[in-house]
Amino acid sequence: MLKVVCRSNILKHIIIFIFLFNINTLLAQEECKFDNKLLTLILMNEYHPKKDIGYEYLISFNNKNDAKRVKEVIPDYFIDSRTILCQNKETCVFLYNQLRENKISNLDLGPFQINSLYHKHEPDKYFSINSSYTIACNYLARLVNEKGYNWYAIASYHSKTPSLNKIYKEKLIKNMLILNNH
């Protein structure tokens, strides 16, 4: 049994997650030109504060009106004003397909919060840590190829809008300092 002694609960979760993430992504990593640490930083930025880093079964709305409409129909699935906790891959895929049928497509899905509006994949791929790792890595590779290996390119994972990119970059750097110190 893995026992982690750590002052901060979030740091404990980060350490446990990194241990498990490194084991679970060995195959996916062969396809990725980036170190696991960089993808872990993205996961740390993308995680939901009510779930562990890397939690797979999340659907987050980018349009507040869409979230409100859906929350009126299935309120018990929401863990905040914009996020559905769907508990397992099958439920996530079912809900995602229902949302798409209802013309709701601007969604961030799974552990890497991959936006389904811009990144088209088979629905089950979003809700698997290994598959979403590969999707995130490939997207990051495209960004780095376009913009060079720099913080702007990496933060463009979230947004190319300068003000949003800057906020995301600052979170990445903050999380990098946390990882490097523990």
Image: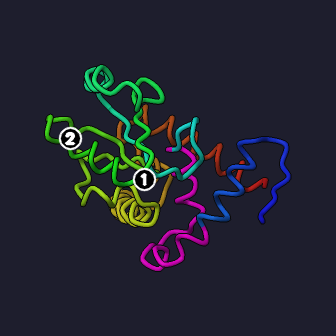
Task: Indicate whether 162 appears above or below 65.
Answer: below
Circle 1 sits in a helix, a strand or a loop, which is it?
helix
Q: Residues within 10 Å of mark 2 (few under 14, many from 20)?
A: few
Residue drawn at (58%, 49%) of the image? 53
Query: In the image, which residues are magenta?
Result: 22-46
Q: Quadrant of the N terminus?
A: bottom right
Across the whole image, how many numbered discs are drawn on residues?
Answer: 2
Q: Do callouts 2 and 1 mark residues in contact (Cβ within 8 Å)?
A: no
The answer to which of 112 and 58 lies nearer the viewer is 58
Percent across and percent down for residue 77 are 40, 32
Instruction: Please report whichever mark, 2 or 1, sits nearer to the chain's N-terminal start.
Output: 2
The answer to which of 29 and 127 lies nearer the viewer is 127
Circle 2 sits in a helix, a strand or a loop, which is it?
helix
The amino acid on which the numbered mark 2 sits, given as a three-letter code, is Gln
152 sits left or right of 173 in the view: left
The amino acid on which the numbered mark 1 sits, given as a three-letter code, is Ala
Percent across and percent down for residue 133 are 44, 63
Task: Indicate whether 166 appears above or below 65.
Answer: below
- Determine which of the numbered discs, if any, sits on residue 153 in the image: 1
138 sits left or right of 41 in the view: left
Asked if residue 148 shows in the view, the reply is no
Whether 31 is among the magenta residues is: yes
Residue drawn at (40%, 60%) of the image? 132
